[in-house]
């Protein structure tokens, strides 16, 4: 018993050193970056870094006057929301088939869907660029919507599939004896029962879409299609260099809603991030 | 809306009049009237052919979408890689691009850099995530820790790249901090040295993505049987031995899946390179994705970029068919 208490005590001290240390590693850069967002531009790049800057809303005024930030935000929202809706419409029936039916090629089709997630964006970047060019969709939010949907479709399908597999067969057998058809079962039993999975999938897909960078960089060339993610990379004042305080401020504007979404699905996060492979 | 579309395809031939309870669904059909004595006769029947085709019909839209977005670009890249593309003119070169690429030192460097930067970064974040997950999962404040540790992951990657670009290069913060503890005695030129430049990319990636692994590992640890651990503890086993001999083996499938997924994403590293180093110094931080981007969209060698894409695609398929397939099978319960 003495020994038990001893190991306990030791690891407790060590535990808080490790956990506290990593918490600082996570938080300090964020707090420092937040302070960048609220300081005048003259205090951003200095020979000796300034840790206690003077308070200033310069970045905010600059964003409001010089950059069509509302437009970027609108583009992000339209492209991301649209892509998530496309994903759900395509993925729910697909996940239903993969989780509920025995058919030839099921494993292979499932794995093919999964494997599209592994394709590096750069591999398809050139062809996709030409595809959208011929379709006349360059610099358009619709192109972004289509591409985000494609990127996340595998993820959304696999997450929802995993949740559907958990639904007990008896539930639908009962409905089936009552004479309900397959699609009615999907709509009235399966979808409500795996709603947490659907929401998780939607949130994770939305985050990946908000963050997408390479395709957006190639497809968007003006404020017509710039999203928050790529607009950031263009916050350069020409000869003045990169406008860090505006970048910082925009990062936090995008960070807050994402944080809220993630806290909402916290319990399901590990399962979602592993595409359903790990049940948390 | 979707439901109705599917209904009209799949359900028409045999609608039980149980369905009349859902008025809009049946509105189109006199079918219900035509089969009045099917009421409560158990599972519905539909023609065998349709029954067989049904799962494929459900999968068809998603598959079609993915095929357009993967198969088409794949074929297009293969085709384009056989040409020298200069703006609007395509000039046939056969396998010329491939033989040039295989002798291109920049290509091999990019492949090597991706492996080096990705490998070190993945190893570090796995080690850190395992450690903090092990210490955190039984902690009473686990919910708080989780949110704090999660935060770096929730910033847009482009924003994170700027955080570290400013901290390392433009704002000299890291240099300043290192100076104040006496580790260096002047500003460090992070982009002037191969390994320092790679390190900045690794730091940014580890900082942002350790949470991904952490979240998964914590969930796995919380989900596993606590009794074995408790028994070992009562037997006087030390925590490192419990970790190595009990927790780690039990987590193996989860670790494999999580590390595989993270590994896939790391090999596609682009944003940090684009914002922070642009491949400098001397191409030492150029990843495969950045190589393709630079060849295609900076130098407009589209045929060449496509050839590189095809090679990377082949590599991806090999990895997918071996490592990933196995990982996802072992990860399933």
Image: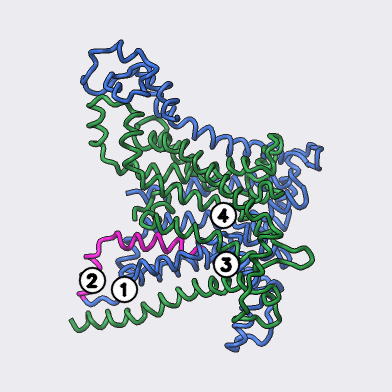
Chain colours: A green, B blue
> Is B320 situated above or below A16?
above
Co-location on one chain, circles 2 and 3:
yes
Q: Secondary structure at mark 4?
A: helix
- Closer to the camera: disc 3 or disc 4? 4
- x%, y% of residue A196? 36, 47
> Is B149 situated above or below A197?
below
Q: Secondary structure at mark 3?
A: helix
Q: Is residue A183 left or right of residue B236?
A: right
> Disc 2 and disc 3: Cα gap in Å?
38 Å
Q: Secondary structure at mark 1?
A: helix
For the residues bearing labels 2 and 1, Cβ distance under 8 angstroms: yes
Q: Secondary structure at mark 2?
A: helix
Span shown in magenta: B209-235
- Seen from the viewer's position, the closer of residues B307 and A12 is A12
Prevailing secondary structure class for the magenta stretch in the rendered image:
helix
Q: Residue at label 2? A: B232
Q: Chain of mark 3?
A: B
- Closer to the camera: disc 2 or disc 3? 3
> Disc 1 and disc 4: Cα gap in Å?
40 Å
The residue positioned 47% from the left and 36% from the top of the image is: A90
Q: Residue at label 1? A: B241
Mark yes or no: residue B199 visible: no
Q: Residue at label 3? A: B204
The residue positioned 52% from the left and 54% from the top of the image is: B264
Q: Is residue B189 left or right of residue B152?
A: right
């Amino acid at each position: 018993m003495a020994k038990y208490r001893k190991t306990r005590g030791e690891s407790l001290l060590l535990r808080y050193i490790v956990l506290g240390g990593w918490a600082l590693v996570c938080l300090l850069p964020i707090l420092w970056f937040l302070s960048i967002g609220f300081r005048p531009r003259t205090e951003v790049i200095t020979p000796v870094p300034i840790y206690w800057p003077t308070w200033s809303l310069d970045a905010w005024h600059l964003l409001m006057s010089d950059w069509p930030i509302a437009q970027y935000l609108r583009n992000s929202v339209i492209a991301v929301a649209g892509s998530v809706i496309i994903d759900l419409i395509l993925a729910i029936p697909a996940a239903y088939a993969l989780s509920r039916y025995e058919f030839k090629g099921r494993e292979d089709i499932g794995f093919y869907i999964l494997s599209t997630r592994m394709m590096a964006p750069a591999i398809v970047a050139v062809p996709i660029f030409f595809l959208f060019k011929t379709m006349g969709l360059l610099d358009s939010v619709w192109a972004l919507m289509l591409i985000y949907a494609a990127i996340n479709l595998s993820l959304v399908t696999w997450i929802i599939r995993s949740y559907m597999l958990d639904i007990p067969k008896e539930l639908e057998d009962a409905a089936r004896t009552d004479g309900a058809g397959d699609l009615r079962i999907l709509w009235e039993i399966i979808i409500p029962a795996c709603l947490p999975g659907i929401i998780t999938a939607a949130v994770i897909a939305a985050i990946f879409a908000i963050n997408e960078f390479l395709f957006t960089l190639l497809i968007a060339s003006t404020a017509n299609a710039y999203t928050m993610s790529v607009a950031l990379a263009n916050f350069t004042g020409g000869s003045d260099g990169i406008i860090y305080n505006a970048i910082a401020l925009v990062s936090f504007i995008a960070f807050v809603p994402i944080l809220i979404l993630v806290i909402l699905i916290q319990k399901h996060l590990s399962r979602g991030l592993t595409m359903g492979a790990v049940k948390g | 809306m979707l439901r109705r579309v599917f209904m009209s395809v799949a359900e028409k031939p045999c609608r039980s009049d149980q369905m009349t309870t859902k008025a809009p669904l049946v509105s189109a059909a006199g079918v219900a009237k035509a089969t009045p004595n099917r009421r409560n006769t158990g599972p519905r029947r539909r023609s065998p052919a349709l029954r067989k085709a049904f799962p494929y019909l459900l999968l068809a839209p998603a598959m079609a979408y993915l095929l357009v977005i993967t198969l088409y670009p794949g074929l297009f890249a293969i085709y384009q890689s056989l040409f020298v593309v200069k703006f609007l003119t395509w000039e046939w070169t056969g396998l010329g691009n491939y033989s040039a690429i295989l002798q291109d030192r920049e290509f091999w460097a990019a492949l090597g850099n991706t492996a080096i930067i990705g490998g070190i970064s993945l190893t570090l974040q796995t080690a850190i995530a395992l450690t903090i997950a092990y210490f955190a999962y039984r902690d009473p404040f686990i919910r708080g820790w989780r949110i704090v540790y999660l935060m770096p992951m929730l910033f847009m990657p482009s924003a994170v790249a700027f955080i570290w670009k400013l901290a390392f290069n433009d704002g000299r913060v890291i240099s300043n901090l290192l100076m104040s503890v006496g580790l260096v005695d002047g500003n460090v030129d992070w982009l002037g040295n191969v390994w320092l430049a790679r390190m900045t990319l690794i730091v940014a990636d580890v900082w942002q993505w350790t949470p991904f692994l952490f979240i998964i590992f914590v969930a796995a640890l919380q989900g596993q049987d606590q009794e074995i651990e408790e028994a070992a503890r009562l037997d006087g086993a030390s925590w490192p031995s419990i970790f190595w001999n009990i927790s780690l083996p039990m987590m193996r499938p989860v670790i494999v899946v999580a590390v595989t997924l993270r590994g896939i994403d790391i090999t596609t590293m682009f944003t940090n390179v684009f914002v922070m180093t642009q491949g400098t110094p001397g191409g030492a931080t150029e990843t495969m994705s950045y190589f393709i981007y630079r060849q295609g969209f900076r130098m407009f060698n589209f045929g060449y970029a496509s050839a590189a894409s095809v090679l990377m695609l082949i590599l991806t398929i090999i990895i997918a068919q071996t490592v990933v397939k196995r990982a996802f099978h072992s990860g399933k319960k």
